[in-house]
Every structure is written in C-alpha cells, then in structure tokens.
Amino acid sequence: QVQLVGSGGGLVQAGGSLRLSCTASGSIFSINLIAWYRQAPGKQRELVATITSDGSTSYADSVKGRFTISRDNAKNMEYLQMNSLKPEDTGVYYCNAQDYLGGGYWGQGTQVTVSS
C-alpha cells in the first residue's frame, strides 16, 4: 500500500506560479510512476504530467513549457512546479502513484485557483 498526501495549492493571479508537493509513504519501493491529474469544475479528471522511476517525464500539451514535474527520492516527495499560470489551469489537483503490480493510489486533492 502507498499513501499520498498532496499540498501546495492556493489562489494566484494569472501569470503567477505555484509549487505542488506530494509526499509518499508506505510501500514506496513499489512505485514505478507518479502523476499529477487535475479536475476543473464540470469536467473530467485529466492527466497533467508524469514521471517514472528512472526520471522520464511527460506532459499534457496544455502545460508543456510551463509546468515541471520532479521527484526527490531521498525525501519521498514529488513536485509539480507551475509557472505562467492561466485561469484555465484552475481545478483540483491530485497526485497519483502506480506500482509495478498495477495498483493505483490517489492523494487527496489540492485546490488551485488562478484569477484573471
């Protein structure tokens, strides 16, 4: 089992920055991928960024060049640095972990609100 705790959301003006954090505990050795998803009001949850155990990253087209996903294995933490935020980035952000056995785990969401 893996437990995830996400944090770092808040209210920011368009063009500003936020850094989200996700702390992992439990069977962290089994994690092979960490992802951030977001869900805007009235919309489906969408994938924002992923990072694998070997450090490979991928991003949704809508955030490429603005968001950076990273991990600090020593601290069992993952981060999503969000720059040049836009109002359409508003939503609840969730960290997600997938293990080698196909299990998936979710952290509680953290609200990001970008005002225009």
Image: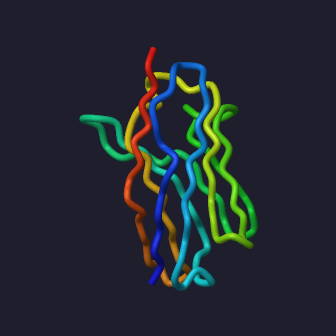
What's the residue at 51%, 68% (across, down)?
97
Residue 25 x, y percent position in the rendering: 53, 77
Q: Nearer the viewer, residue 6 or 100?
A: 6
The answer to whether 87 is drawn above or below residue 52 in the figure is above
Image quadrant of residue 59? top right
Residue 18 x, y percent position in the rendering: 58, 37
The answer to whether 57 is drawn above or below residue 23 in the figure is above
Looking at the picture, the colour scheme in use is rainbow
Q: Nearer the viewer, residue 45 or 73?
A: 73
Instruction: Left or right? Give the position of 103 relative to 30.
Output: left
What's the residue at 63%, 83% (across, down)?
29
Residue closest to the far top: 116
Instruction: Give the quarter of the figure containing the C terminus.
Output: top left
Q: Nearer the viewer, residue 24 or 100?
A: 24
What's the residue at 42%, 70% (across, down)?
105
The answer to whether 94 is drawn above or below residue 62 in the figure is below
The answer to whether 63 is drawn above or below residue 59 in the figure is above
Instruction: Give the quarter of the figure containing the N terminus.
Output: bottom left
Report the label total: 0
Image quadrant of residue 51? bottom right
What's the residue at 73%, 59% (across, down)?
56
Q: Nearer the viewer, residue 78 or 60?
A: 78
Image quadrant of residue 38? top left
Residue 75 x, y percent position in the rendering: 69, 70
Residue closest to the far left: 42
